[in-house]
Amino acid sequence: MADYIETARRVIDVEVAGLQALSAGLGNEFSRAVEMILAVKGRVIVSGMGKSGHVGRKIAATFASTGTPAQFVHPAEASHGDLGMVTAADLALVLSNSGETPELADLIAHTRRFSIPLIGVAARPGSTLMRQADVALALPAAAEACGNGIVPTTSTTMTLALGDALAIALMEHRRFTPEHFRTFHPGGKLGALLAKVGDLMQADLPLVDLHAPMSEALLVISQKGYGVTGVVDAQGALAGIITDGDLRRHMQGLLDLDAAAVMTPAPRTIGPEALAGAALAQMQERKITCLFAVQDGRPCGILHIHDCLRAGLV
């Protein structure tokens, strides 16, 4: 087992060295690539064959989810009609470790014929792809992690990292926020974490007035099913909350009291525009099961931990 771990560490160390060389070699061509993509009115068409194609699909997906419209086009399919997807308003980002992948020839020729901006990524600066490209992003000379130089490992890792670097540079320039990301990525655990309180909260609120008798408060707690009720003042602002803990503390003569006498004043609240993940963190930190959402001092919703569970936050 020690040999397996030694191999794994060697592979990772080789790839780390490649990434360090990539970082050190970034220069004006990278900046030009970012500016070219920012100027595009259409989409970024990402293409590559084999392992470069797999990496290209991930780069296109990262672009698309971070505010840069992008699509992967397989180079072989491009030669059989999919070139029609590539318009004069687009930009092509073409990946090829050698820069001589024959399946890319038709796509490269198409970009030259219709003056479509072309960014090439390859390890050989003098290759056909790099000579034809408007911007050539050269991968540094780095050993593949397999040891004999035939398995794409370090080269694909560098290409993937370069794509991530482009995507994040574009995202930061566009001031792309978590809210924007939520728009493009509503599904899964990540989408749930970026949901807003207003997306998950319930509008059927358990509320009583300050001077409501506790018999009424108990009825509201039972009917609404949240285990709590909010207490509002004459202006409709949230003045307090009654929980099962409050009920236990006032067991003696409970029905002779009003809501104001039993409630916990100034309860913890959250805004409807806050991230649901932040609300869940508050509930977990304070060991509570729900939060009132408040806008301009007035309760507008209630978020229960069960709402977070249903949304996949937990």
Image (cartoon, grey):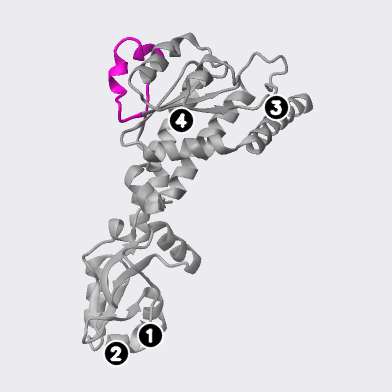
> Horizontal placement of 188 versus 237: left or right?
right
> Which badge, 4 or 1, is on the more N-terminal residue?
4
What whole-number distance in Å separates the C-alpha atoms at marks 2 and 3? 71 Å
What whole-number distance in Å separates the C-alpha atoms at marks 4 and 1? 59 Å
Q: Give, as a single range, the part of the protein colored magenta.
A: 71-90
Residue to which mark 1 is pinned: 250
What whole-number distance in Å separates the C-alpha atoms at marks 4 and 2? 62 Å
Give the x, y percent position of residue 201: 29, 61
What whole-number distance in Å separates the C-alpha atoms at marks 4 and 3? 22 Å
Between 157 and 107, the residue placed more toward the observer is: 107
Give the amino acid type for the residue marked by disc 2 in the picture.
Answer: Leu
> Which badge, 2 or 1, is on the more N-terminal residue?
1
10 Å crowding of disc 1: few (<14), some (14-19), many (20+): some
User: Does residue 194 appear in the picture of this structure?
Assistant: no
Q: Quadrant of the N terminus?
A: top right
> Which badge, 4 or 2, is on the more N-terminal residue?
4
Q: Residue at x 61, y 24 (%)?
A: 155
Residue to which mark 3 is pinned: 11
Query: Dot 3: what SS?
Result: helix
Residue to which mark 2 is pinned: 257
Residue to which mark 4 is pinned: 58
Q: Residue at x 53, y 21 (%)?
A: 130
What whole-number distance in Å separates the C-alpha atoms at marks 1 and 3? 65 Å
User: Does residue 111 appear in the picture of this structure?
Assistant: yes
Give the amino acid type for the residue marked by disc 3 in the picture.
Answer: Val
Q: Is residue 298 magenta?
A: no
